[in-house]
Amino acid sequence: MGVDLREFDETYEDVEPPDKASYEEVPDGVYQVRVEKIELKYSKVREEGGGNPMLRWTLRVLTPAFEGALIFRQNMIVTEDNIRYLKGDLITCGLKLQKLSHLPARLDELLDIELEVKKVTNASRSGTFSNVYINRRIETQAPRRLPGQPGKKGPDGLPF
């Protein structure tokens, strides 16, 4: 006997499939984005002893030609240079910290902000990789939200 999925039939009929544009990699260029998700995590374990800490950004493209697509960015937190670039990114986003250890408690302050970023693909002997640079914060009157996208919620659980 297989899994019974009948209870989901009505939902399946009513939902629209996701926009494939959100899964396709955007070409190199400058984009306006909104910070949709930000998390501190560890990179994949490469050697015995574990991965390295990093800040992972999920950015939703607002630029019309690629609206809805996702761009991902990681700030590794290992070397002095990594920390220098992370500090610059946080200040550009309007988040000034006295200590890096304060970041976990203040991550929510980065959600829903709008940024201008530049995506650049580089090739090397070890392969092709993309860098995403945060150029500047974009100040808007009200946050732009794509239909069906989650946003910040107040203490009562309702969206702002």
Image (cartoon, rainbow, N blue to C red):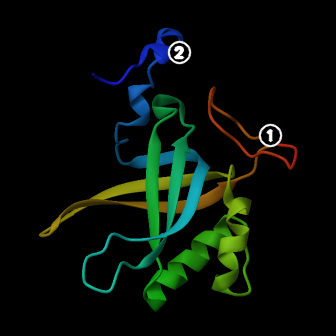
Q: Can see residue 20? A: yes
Residue 142: which disc? 1
**Image depth: mark 2 or mark 1 in front:** 2
Q: Can see residue 12? A: no
Q: Is residue 157 above or below residue 105?
A: above
Q: Residue at x 39, y 20 (%)?
A: 4
Residue 121: quadrant of the picture: bottom left
> Which percent across, then down, holds residue 147?
63, 26
Q: Is residue 138 above or below residue 26?
A: below
Residue 120: quadrant of the picture: bottom left
Q: CA distance from mark 2 to mark 1?
A: 32 Å
Which quadrant is home to the C terminus?
top right
Q: Residues within 10 Å of mark 2 (few under 14, many from 20)?
A: few
> Which percent across, then down, holds residue 41?
49, 69
Residue 51: which disc? none
> Which percent across, then down, holds residue 132?
43, 59
Q: Which residue is mark 2?
A: 11
Kind of residue sitting beneath label 1: Ala
Q: Report the front residue among 104 and 133.
A: 104
Which element is circle 1 on? loop
Figure disc tally: 2
